[in-house]
Image (cartoon, coloured by chain):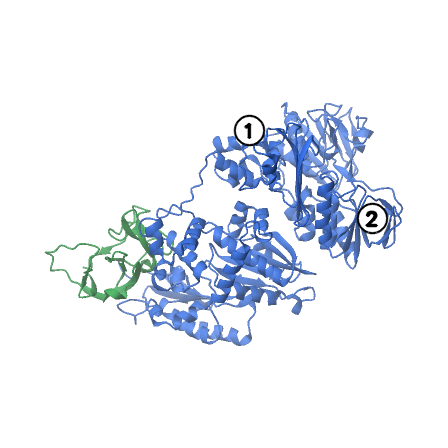
Chain colours: A green, B blue
Amino acid sequence: MTLTGRTTDPGDDTRTWVPICAYTDLIPERGAAALVASDQIAVFRTFDGRVYAVGNRDPFSRAYVMSRGIVGTRGEEPVVVTPMHKQVFSLVTGACLDDPETAIPTYPTRVTDGTLEVSVE
Amino acid sequence: MRIVVAGYGPTAHRLVETLAREGFTGTITVIGEEPRPAYDRVALTSYLKGTSAAELTFPAPGASARVLLGDRVISIDRARRTVTTRDGHEEPYDALVLATGSAPFVPPVPGADRAFVYRTIEDLDAIRAASSGAATGVVVGGGLLGLEAADALRGLGLATHVVEMGAWLMPRQVDEGGGAVLRGHVERLGLTVHTGTGLDRIEDGRVVLAGGTAIDADVVVFSAGVRPRDELARRAGLPVGERGGVVVDEGMRTADPAVYAVGECALAGGMVYGLIGPCNAMAEVAADRILGGSASFTGAEESTKLKLLGVDVASFGRLSGALDVTYMDPVGGVYKKLFVSDDARTLLGGICVGDAAPYTLLRPLVGRELTASPSDLLFASAGGPSVDLPDDAPVCSCNNVSRGEVRAAIAERGATDVPALKKCTRAGTSCGSCVPALASILAAEGVVQDKALCEHFSHSRAELFDIVRVRGITTFSRLIAEHGRGRGCDICKPVVASILASLDGGHVLEGERAALQDTNDHFLANIQKNGTYSVVPRIPGGEITPEKLIVIGEVARDFGLYTKITGGQRIDLFGARVEELPKIWKRLVDAGFESGHAYGKALRTVKSCVGSAWCRYGVQDSVGMAIALELRYRGLRSPHKLKAAVSGCARECAEARGKDFGVIATESGWNLYVGGNGGFTPRHAELLASDLSDEELVRTIDRFLMFYIRTADRLQRTSAWIERIGLDHLRDVVVRDSLGICADLDAAMERHVGGYFDEWRATVEDPEKLRRFASFVNAPGTPDPSIVFETRRDQISPVLVEVTRR
């Protein structure tokens, strides 16, 4: 069984889930970019097997590169580090841990039958 | 207040600098006869090895000083308080400082006018000019400066003889035993030594010794001592010593209270001092007195530590005593002697030849009770008995800095590392021999250098390297589970990836290792501002065939890339999307290109000039050597990027001294410079070893690189690393194998060379590794719509656009 990074409300069946890729397509502690409608999303699989989705745009450099950052932890928080100028973002909340004014969007994820799904509504 | 300084050498420079530092607000006029401002005369010999006059020149003093060059004071009118210069200037003063230095002593032998002296840059220019086309040289004088001059002549390609009147070499600094060991070193370098004899005459093309022996000599250099230049004072009626020197009191004042004398022209306490340390001290005392202080100069120890002809020679304290302990190894060329008081409790002095380690540790202990048995102290070194110094012990004798001042800089001025101590106290900024002592004082004062790499590891990079190496760890997960905490970050992951790559050389994208890499290593390309990448194929030594140039051009055209020539003599192709990288590289690999590792903390390029193959000045095949070195070290992962260059002659067109390792051809081989870089803090590389054969050069670079990879901090360029460990220590380790690790370093480099493969070829041949090169995991056929270009100067240029609200 696979854990999801962001718990979704179990009663919330009305969400629209978009399949992204096979869970096994993700390299542990590495991200991948996905295109959902016209939005770019970065999906990650952490060492403990959880999956997370955040916006792919680095708000500091304005380039769409978050999926290419290094994944790790700061304290207990799973994080991704933008490859441009190394600001650190929480994978859970999207908050920039180096600059409280800045955040990136986060999206609920789940794995269904081995497929990673993201809800972007 | 008006101060006039007669003479503009290092001592005058120190005087002016001290006045400026202490906030002197009057006018200073410095009159120097040389055509250039003060320069570092201690490092004079390096001028013949490629250091420029500009590099030797001291920084200009503050704006308050007016400097007259190429002129000199010829008379002093003490009654009117004015000086007159040769060019006819008249300059009034309230305080006059004589800093006229000394003149080389030229023995009155027939033909002496044919000889050169060794004191100024102009002297060296003249010697260099005379040596061109010459074959033989004689240096008269086997003291400190004489051996430097002999080294210089040897470096200019002359078969060199040294003639010393005393019974052994360097009679003022070492005793007979030390002289014998030193002679062994000097003779092994191919110099011929004649001791216990003087010069009878100089004839055209030869010299004749007192005993009648004739020696061929196209170039003759006198280096037989100096005489204080006290003629100005004599003419002004100021007292001078019997053997020269302007008599001064403890405040550096002559018999005329408005006239001071400092440096080599002064006779202080009946002594004339020629070493930079005491001269600097005199300058500081005079400055203090002029400003109304009461500092005094009461003599200085005449310790010396230097490297002559590659041999460490050091002496300190008294060179005689009731008891002495001697260690002599004629085979290894080491001689060490300590003088102790008759109760064997107090250290009086010592002599070291071939191993100067005891000098740094023991010199400050002169006159104090021994902290270990004399024989143990003979072998004192960094790992030897710990030596605790009292506050008044001198640490830096060039700049007269005591242990107490270093302690104060740490405690009161917040200095927490060696560079800060250098800045606060000036200790370690001249000869540098006390830098290891500064580091140990920092440790003794409890300044803990926070070595923790990041929140996940409390180890330094060097410690992690050893843990990985010794424990045979091959994965990040095991390392962080056993020696760290959490799951890593952008600091520790690339460091561990680099360590693993340095040690076992596997593919950087293999298994778990792929997740450790920063984006550049992960995509084997360099990320640019819009998220595209640049591609740099290796062009070893900058040499490339027309066919390969055409391939690069075609690839760039076909993929619409921006092209630019790099500073490392290769071609950078910009604007590649991740999904294009494998296609681009397939073309390049098929045409015989391989990764240039421009994306890695790794060897980048070995730049070259065209060398002896084409250049009419070239003396060695610099392109051939650059290619050999680049192919040997390609793919070597290191704490930071590594750049190198090879120049085919001393004109240095490859700018090798701006590189981590730079090789400059000599008539007889190669000189190796290390620790240079451009960047934020430019630094010239320093000479590590000279006149190396091809094999010696490669072996020395092998060891230098491997030692750097093992011990440097994260993102520490070789320049900062050498600043930390010291050039002497580096030379001891990689040339003399003082740590006994050279065989290990050699083997590690052999493993690297044997295990090298092109990581781009391995990537394009592996479908698993190619999976990551997709624009979108769910839409691999759709290019990233955020990547947009405009055209500038006929090529693409990135434009950042907002394509989504996320």
Mark 2 belongs to chain: B
* SS class, disc 2: loop
Question: Where on the picture, by quarter, is residue B770?
Answer: bottom left
The residue depicted at 64 percent of the width and 42 percent of the height is B58
- Residue at the left extreme, as displayed: A11
- Looking at the picture, how far across and down is residue B86, in whole percent? 79, 38
Residue B372 shows up from this direction: yes
Report the residue marked by disc 1: B391
- Looking at the picture, how far across and down is residue B371, in whole percent? 56, 32
| Marks 1 and 2, how far apart at CA | 48 Å
The mark nearer the N terminus, 1 or 2, is: 2
Direction from residue B513 to residue B179 in the image, left or right:
right
* SS class, disc 1: loop
Looking at the image, residue B293 lies above or below residue A78: above
Direction from residue B243 to residue A56 in the image, left or right:
left
Report the residue marked by disc 2: B115
The amino acid pointed to by label 1 is Asp
